Image (cartoon, rainbow, N blue to C red):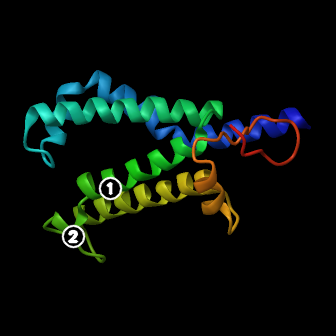
């Protein structure tokens, strides 16, 4: 039974980071020029846009790995939550799409759904970072770099480092 629990926890974590690692990270590597071109929509300086793509790639790979391994996963989840919110605000700007409307054909509505998906994913990462209890934020603040030890066979994780 412990094995199935571990597999279930790993599968849930893998689904949570699947967008970033491997897919978005691999896309940034294989299509670096296009990623920089897209980044220049929000960051006009091409050199700074390239730095931001490298930073995003690092966040996606390192934080996803931390979540999958359970090492400093709570902080990694907080970083990815912030990353999802920032990318939603910078690249999912549905309010700037000229044909945005809730009814009828609208390219802006597709961007709106992507914006909401980014926010929903941020919520999932925040739940991982803070837990599902009312004291989760306090627990996180007390031990921000602690690991949740998600693959322990016993029930309940520890918040020690």
Depth check, mark 2 against mark 1: the one in front is: 1
For marks 2 and 1, give the CA distance: 16 Å
Q: Which mark is residue 100?
A: 2
> Is 153 above or below relative to 102?
above
Report the side of 14 relative to 92 (left or right): right
Quadrant in the picture for residue 23: top left
Q: Which mark is residue 56?
A: none
Residue highlighted by disc 1 = 88
- Up/down of 76 relative to 117, above or below: above
Direction left: furthest residue: 45
> Quarter of the image containing the N terminus?
top right
Label 1, secondary structure: give it: helix
Residue 154 location in percent, x, y?
Answer: 88, 41
Image location (x, y in percent) of residue 80: 45, 45
Circle 2: is it few (<14), some (14-19), or many (20+) Cα within 10 Å? some
Circles 2 and 1: CB distance less than 8 Å? no
For the point 61% across and 56% down, which residue is it?
130
């Amino acid at each position: 039974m412990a094995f199935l629990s571990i597999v279930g926890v790993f599968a849930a974590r893998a689904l949570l980071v699947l967008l970033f690692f491997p897919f978005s990270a691999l896309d940034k590597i294989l299509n670096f020029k296009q990623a920089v071109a897209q980044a220049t929509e929000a960051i006009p300086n091409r050199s700074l846009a390239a730095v931001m793509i490298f930073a995003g790639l690092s966040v996606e790979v390192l934080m996803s790995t931390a979540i999958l391994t359970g090492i400093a996963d709570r902080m990694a989840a907080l970083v990815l939550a912030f990353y999802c919110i920032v990318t939603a605000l910078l690249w999912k700007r549905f309010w700037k799409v000229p044909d945005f409307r809730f009814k009828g054909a609208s390219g802006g509505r597709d961007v709106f759904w992507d914006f909401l998906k980014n926010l929903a994913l941020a919520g999932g990462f925040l739940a991982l970072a803070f837990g599902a209890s009312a004291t989760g934020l306090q627990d996180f603040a007390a031990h921000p770099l602690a690991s949740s030890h998600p693959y322990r066979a016993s029930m309940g994780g520890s918040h020690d480092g």
